[in-house]
Structure formats: C-alpha cells, structure tokens
Image (cartoon, coloured by chain):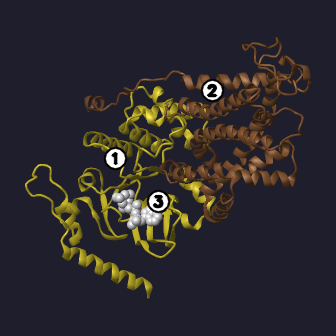
Amino acid sequence: MIAYLSIRNLSVSLSNGPEILRSISLDVDAGEVHGLVGESGAGKSIIGKSVLGILPRAMGITSGEIWLDGVNLLSLSVAQRRRRIGALAALIPQDPLTALNPSRRIGPQITRRLVGILGWSKSAAQARALELLKEVHIENPEHVMRSYPHELSGGMRQRVLIASAFAAEPKLIIADEPTTALDVTVQKQILRLVGEMQARHRTALLFVTHDLGVVSKVCDHLSVLYAGMIVEKSQMRSFFAAPSHPYSRALLAASPKYDDLSGGLVPVPQAVIDQLDGEITAFDKGSRT
Amino acid sequence: MLCSIQSYAMRDTRSEIRPKLGIRLWLCGGWLFCLVLGALFAPWISPQDPLAQDLFAARLPPFWVAGSEPGFWLGTDSLGRDVLSRMLHGARLALIVAFIAGTLTCLIGSTLGIFAGYYQGWADRVISRFIDIWMAFPPVLFAILLIAVIGTGMTSIIIAIIIIDWTRFTRVVRAETMSQSVMDYIASAQVAGRGKFSTMVSEILPNLLPTIVVLLSLEMGIAVIVEAILSFVNLSISTDSPTWGGMIAEGRISIHQAWWVLVFPLIALFLTVLSFSQFGEGLKDRFDPVLR
Ligand SMILES: Nc1ncnc2c1ncn2[C@@H]1O[C@H](COP(=O)(O)OP(=O)(O)OP(=O)(O)O)[C@@H](O)[C@H]1O
Ligand SMILES: [Mg+2]
C-alpha cells in the first residue's frame, strides 16, 4: 500500500550543477503530520516546491518519483500535473507578507481554487470562504473578505492563508514554516489552528520548520534534513527519546530551553559536521558511479 | 476550550482611512480637463479664425495692456493672428498626439516588458539587448532623423514618439514584473491550478497598473514636449496649422516687440507637461490599494 504522498529518491539540482536535494525519500499518509526539520538552506522549502511543481526557474528535478494519491506526478504533462495538484494539494507559504496578492481583495484570493478548479458557483464559494474564515477564528469575516492584504495584521494574514489552504478540502497540505514570521503568542495560536484544521479535515500535512519545539507539538513523524540529504527519519516519540543520528542529537542539544537559560547556546560539534560532510561526499561518489 | 478559542479570536482594529482627494490631483486634473474641453470645442469657442492674418492688427497686446483690442484676448502675433485662437487649435494637435502616442507607446512597451520579465529566457535576452542598443541613441536627435526619413505629419510624429520611448515602459515594467514574479502569491496561484499566462494577466498585471498609469501619464507629457520640439524645428504638421512649438518658434523672433506670442504658449506647454506628470502620481496615491 502506497502512502498518500510518497517521494522516492528525489534529486533536485541547479541547472549549473550543484545538487540541492540528494535522493530524498519520504512518505506522508492521510491524516498524518510529517515534520521536516533542518537548518536554514538545507532544502526544506525546495522539497515542498518540488511536490507542488513550483521550483525556481534555475532548478530542475534530475531523478526520482513523486506519488500523489497513487499517481506519479512526474509522469504527467505540465497541464495535467497542475490540475491534479490544484485539486488535491495546497500550500501554506513561508512568508505571509508576500503570499497574498497585494492588489486583490482577500475574498477572491480564497475562493479562486473553488471557482477555478472545482467549478463552484461564485456565491457558493463566497459562502464557503466565510465559513472558513470563521473556522480560523476571524471575527467579522465579511469585512475581511472585502479587505486588501495590507489592511490585515500578520497573524490575520496567516489565518487567511490557512483558511485558503483548507478551502477546497485538499488531501495534502504543505505548510512551509507557517509560524516563523509571527511572534510567539500568535505562533501558538496558529499552530493550534493548523493542528485543529488538519485533524478535522484528515489532511496529510507536510510540516516544514526549523523549530524542534514546534515539531514536538504537532508532528507524528519527522525527517531531519542536512544539505539536501535526509539524515534521520523516525517516529516523533522515539526521536525525542533517543535520536539515532549524532546530528539529530546535536540539534536537540542546540534547541534553546526556555525554562533553563543557564546552559547558553550549544553549537553543533565539529566532529558531527565532519561526519555529515563525509556522508555527503560518500553519497555524491556513490551517485556518480 | 471554547473560552480559549474566544481569547485568540482576532479582532480587526484597522479602520478605513480614506485620504481626501489630493489638491494636486484636483489642480492637474482641472487644467487637463479645461485643456481637453478647449481643444474639443476649439472651432466653436475660438474668438477668431486662427489662420486669419490682419497686418493692421499685428502685435496687439493682451487685453489688460493699453492698446489692446476687444476680441483678441491674448493679443496677436506679427501677422495679426489671434494668439488665444491659435493656442486652442494648437492644443488639439498636442492632445491628440499625447493621447495616441502615449497610449500606443504604453501598450507596446508594457507588453514587451511584462513578457520579458515574466517568461525570461530568450525573449528577455532579445528584448534586453534591443533596449541596450536603443538607449545608445540620443532621443531627440533620433526623432529628428526619423522624421527626416519618414516625412512630416501627425502619423510620423506618433511613430517617432513610440520608437523613441517604448524602452521607458519596457525597462520599468520588466523590472517590476521580475520582482513580482518571485513572490509567494504567484506560487500560490500556480498551486491553485492557474496557468502561466493567466497568472501573468490576473495576478501580476494588477500590481503593475499603478506604475503603468504613472508612466503613461508622464509619457503623455513627454509626447507633448516632443511634438512641441518637432514643430519648433518645423518638422511637425504642415506649416500653417497652429502648433504650440511653432508659436514658440515664431514668438522667439519677436520677443522684444511682442513677448505674449512666446510667453502664453510656453506657459500652456509648461502647465500641460507638469499636469500630466503630476496627474499620474496623484492617481497612484489615490487609487493604489497598497499606498491608500
Ligand atoms: N531561486 C533559487 N536559485 C538558486 N538557489 C536557490 C534558490 N532558492 C533556494 N536555493 C538554494 O537551495 C537551497 C535550499 O533552499 P531552501 O529554500 O529549500 O532552504 P530552507 O531549508 O527552506 O531554508 P529556510 O529555513 O531558510 O527557509 C539553498 O542552498 C539555497 O541557496
Ligand atoms: Mg524555506
């Protein structure tokens, strides 16, 4: 039985050579939350973008398969793929500032998928959008629907993005650090909201973050990414109990503990980085032969 | 649980603040509006025939100066032609050129710019190289050369303006498109199943409109200047139809005897160009949802 989203041996590289993703494999099942952690630049966002078919111009998928709902997306034509992704998947983007079109009102930005892909009538889509805005705890949704993005606060924008991601009942949502741009209290609310919505709609959720604290709250499984390579994949509970890879252990040790600040910051030990670099070199050698 | 949901329900506190319609927009818009009316109704409201010469009424001063004659409000030139009537008729040509040349330049330049900026690749490389070459020519010299080759007349002026100025739109629109097209909302639109072309039209274009409007308005002002320059050097329409540039050229010769022949068309030209450039800015301030 194949998982709802199944990425198999996915490699992505820049058109001028450097590898960004090194043979990534990961599975996310319906109703499951899969966390993707790693330091900045590890390639977390690129995984999400590969799945959704929105890679930057300079990048290309060199090998691998992306199965979504039993179909390998990479075997489809561009138009077919776009339609399939549009119907099944959605994105909660990293930056709520640039994720909404500044010159269009909120309403049509939420309803576009309903009208464009699912072929709903305008009024039905409108009603659904209102309902969704209430679901993400926005008071006065009628007013928000008529607002422009710059008239909303960051937290409200993020709520709008969550509402529009869940609008068409997608079976897969990729949340790319939905809380990084927000302050801690709003962050908590948004996390709870995403969890709530995910459970209610039984969505498969790929949750990208670099915050292990966040992962421990919302995820069932997690993958640790380093320089485009998955160094550890495990159950949430077993990961926090006993991380198997030294890098994971270093990450855990490095994450700040708010109740005990006396420890200071713990960098990732040089020995661990050397070991990782060794693994990457070995991988690159292996993939070349 | 219910209580906690209540506590994190968000309230929108930003009220709708609408700035007053700016004074700048009123002044510029007002001048342009009067000018359009004057140009439209020139044949009916002109006090005199703009071409009628009367050597006995040559160099009459404007109405508030001693020696003026009723009916010649802004005086007459050295051939006895009424300055006000000539200016009104000159406004027709100036505005027709401004609107047609401005709009066409805008359409052509912006289209090239948005395609180059959005699709990039070879289209962008070709268009960008073309712009580089184009910008190496000094524009007015280029226009004069062009008119000398394709001949005088309104169509020639319009073509000259388009050929000189399309790069202004293309450069700005291209850069703006590029900065918009890496934004997350473009990716979101594509995830939502939008095609590439339709994303460009429905997501990017609305964000370019404020910039395009400002440029268009500015371009209309520039078209008025270019037309004036070309008529100043006598490369405009046939020599007898009145133009602001032509009036300025003639007025220059008799400035010591009849300053009004030079000064009034100059003021009209100045106000018109200023109004066009400020009108666009004013519109942007007023209607751009991001700035509003
Ligand atoms: N448009 C692009 N062109 C070239 N390289 C890029 C581009 N976008 C990202 N990269 C490279 O791809 C790699 C992975 O980037 P990615 O955005 O996935 O990082 P990330 O793990 O999401 O980091 P962050 O936590 O900061 O968002 C980085 O090394 C980055 O330099
Ligand atoms: Mg990222």
- Residue furthest to the top in view is B70
Query: Badge 3 is on which residue?
Result: A49
Quarter of the image holding residue B77?
top right
Q: Determine the secondary structure under disc 1.
A: loop
Q: Say the numbered circle drawn on residue A181.
A: 1
Q: Chain of mark 1?
A: A
Query: Badge 2 is on which residue?
Result: B28
**Chain letter, yellow in picture:** A
**Image spot of residue B9 (x, y percent):** 33, 30
Residue A238 against residue A91 in the figure, above or below: below
A98 left or right, relative to B67: left
Quarter of the image holding residue A73?
bottom right
Quadrant occupied by the N terminus of chain B? top left
Q: Residue type at mark 3: give it.
A: Lys
- Work out whether residue A253 can be spotted: yes
Q: Determine the secondary structure under disc 3.
A: helix
A177 left or right, relative to B21: left
